Image: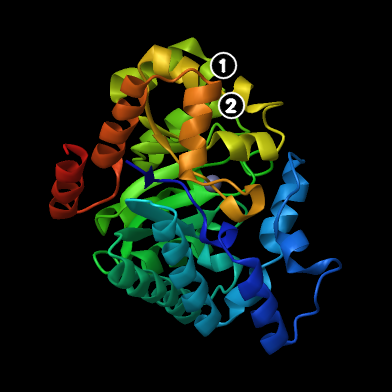
Amino acid sequence: MLINLHSHLEGRVRPATAAQLADAFGVPSPEGGWERAIRLDGPATLTEYLTRVASTYPFFRSLDATRRIAREAVEDAAASGLDYLELRFGPATHVQNARGLRDAVAAVTEGMQEASHSTGMPSGAVISALRHHDSETNEAVARAAASFAGKGVVGFDLAGDELLYPAHVPHKNAFALARSAGLGITCHAAEAGPASAAREAVELFGATRIGHGAHIIDDPALLRWCADEGIVIEICPTSNWYTGAIASVAQHPAPLFRDAGVKLVLGDDNPMQTGTNLRDEREVLQNVLGFTKTDLDEIDRVSVEAAFLTDGERSALAARLAH
Ligand SMILES: [Zn+2]
């Protein structure tokens, strides 16, 4: 089963769509064309990686373009054989007033729902607050996300530079707003920051899932705590390699999490930059990191359990898993 629980909309813009939108909007073509501007040839630095993701940001200023990008992202995911996709989007990168945030979230959910309807693959939007934004902005993002709870938005997240902006307290209210709207809670944490960041995200935000969480393995007590509390770690091995966080996929800590009894789910993070997809990530687990068929079955089971689905949708996915 292919369940993708960590993927960013901004990392799923087709180069061909970028080229068309650039023509329409008068955005200057980057040297070497959009394919080169978006994709990485191989592992790079985090800065280089983020520059490629950010090359498509100008297009998200248009609601029509945002809707199209969201629709195509879900269509591409369905075409790659996914059974379910959660797609993250950080609207305050592109617009910051309350009305603009709501409109941007609406455009994303409309595009996703249109494609889910035409392809039959369920999907849900996870709205990301950003670490470098202030409390007020992130609370406005949470309100925009909350107004689409049950209408396409399924979760809330915090993303961005964890080294420069490690503080969690300023974003506590944003997460409280999201939680009270019934949204699922995840958080990029302990990716660049220390293991303790993951526990803070759980205790301050109510996160049930942690994005990346690679540094949790530096602290055996915290690793055990994650296993005991049933915290789910969203792993994206190829992305961690391409950002330079690990020297090769063979160094990914997934086996250490597995051996400690920590629940794992998979994502492809920014597939247009890395050229990967969820099937490739499973192959990395199996062929490079020594995951057995039983280990992968366990990831499927945890994914169905940890996805931000309604109970009805979860049962439908669980029923497919049983066959
Ligand atoms: Zn991410």
Say which residue appears at 37% left-offset and 34% top-offset: 203
Q: Which residue is mark 2?
A: 194
Q: Is residue 235 visible?
A: no
Foreground residue, 314 or 319? 319
Give the x, y percent position of residue 47: 76, 47
Mark 1 and mark 2: Cα distance apart in space: 8 Å
In this rendering, is residue 32 above or below 247?
A: below
For the N terminus, give its image quadrant.
top left
Q: Amino acid at mark 1?
A: Asp
- Please rate how many residues cluster around mark 1, counting C-alpha atoms within 10 Å: few if below 14, some from 14 to 19, many from 20: few
The label number, if any, that marks residue 315 in the structure image:
none
Say which residue appears at 54% left-offset and 49% top-offset: 159
As drawn, is 264 to the left or to the right of 122?
A: right
Q: Which residue is mark 1?
A: 218
- Please rate how many residues cluster around mark 2, counting C-alpha atoms within 10 Å: few if below 14, some from 14 to 19, many from 20: many
The total number of labels drawn is 2
User: In which image quadrant can residue 19 be found?
Assistant: bottom right
